[in-house]
Image (cartoon, rainbow, N blue to C red):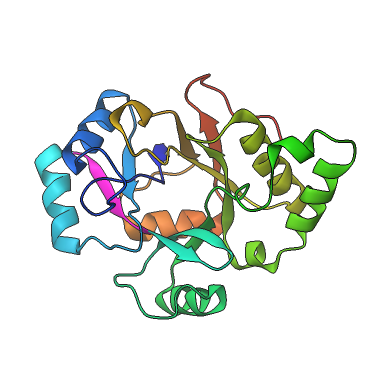
Amino acid sequence: MLIDLHTHSYPHSDDSFMSVDELIEGSKSLGLDAICLTDHDAFWTTEQIDYLSNRHNFLIIPGCEINTEAGHVLVFGLSKYEFGMHKPEFLQACVDKAGGAMIAAHPYRRRFIEEPAEKPGVREEMLERAGGDEFFQMCQGLEALNGRGLSIQNQFSLDLGGMLSVSMTAGSDAHKVEQIGTVATEFERHVSCLADLIKELQAGRFHPVDLRHKTAPDT
């Protein structure tokens, strides 16, 4: 089952250039089975999600992308933003209390710089430094493929996930219609609601898929 775990639409995300209807219809047309709405520090209500799912006859799952001091996190299971969630430890406590799940979004950011990485040994040092970040141990997985990331950036994330032996996801991070459907997460079991998604994320029964090449990436 293919699910895009990372999407943005306007006006919930003010840096997006597409409406939620465009996002949903675009995802349907490209063969995805579901999408997660993960706008920046903003939450959709259950009523809004149900309305959109029924209107489009398509599975839509609520989530959120939280900006923390350690990086961006895709969270599932929360319903509102609380002051202090910019602190990873506080966010983890909130998610644990709700029985939710956390995925580290585009982990290459802040940790991988392209030009210095070309020098001998520098990339390995960046990878080792990132691997020692306790932030990743707080999450149920990391986003190994980001649809807007460069190949070398995503490869860094894939190598990081492999080094840490953690479960890995993929999300388009779409902000425009043309960015929809680039990558997705394939789940081994059927997901029909938020509770199912959280259960599968916690169990690690998924892997990233690059839909541009129709393959799972090498790790």
Quadrant location of the C terminus in the rendered image: top right
Identify which residue is drawn at 58% across, 63% down: 139
- Start and end of the magenta stretch? 58-64
Residue 49 lies, in percent from the top left, at 19, 54
Residue 113's x, y, as percent?
Answer: 69, 43
Residue sitting at 9 percent across and 42 percent down?
55
Residue at x 20% of width, y 31% of height: 25
Dominant secondary structure, magenta? strand
Q: Is residue 13 left or right of residue 183?
A: left
Q: Position of residue 193 (x, y in %)?
A: 30, 54
**Which residue is at the far top?**
213
Q: Is residue 27 magenta?
A: no
* In front of the other: 28 or 160: 160
Measured as percent of width and height from the top left, residue 3 is found at 39, 40
Q: Nearer the viewer, residue 193 or 27?
A: 27
Q: How many marks?
A: 0
Work out whether residue 185 or residue 14 is closer to the camera in this orientation and state it.
14
Q: Is residue 188 above or below residue 37?
A: above
Q: Residue furthest right?
A: 120
Q: Is residue 1 above or below residue 31?
A: below
Q: Quadrant of residue 116?
A: top right
Quadrant of the frame with the N terminus: top left
Task: Inspect the magenta stretch and tell me whether residue 62 lies in it.
Answer: yes
What residue lies at 20% left-to-right and 34% top-to-bottom? 22
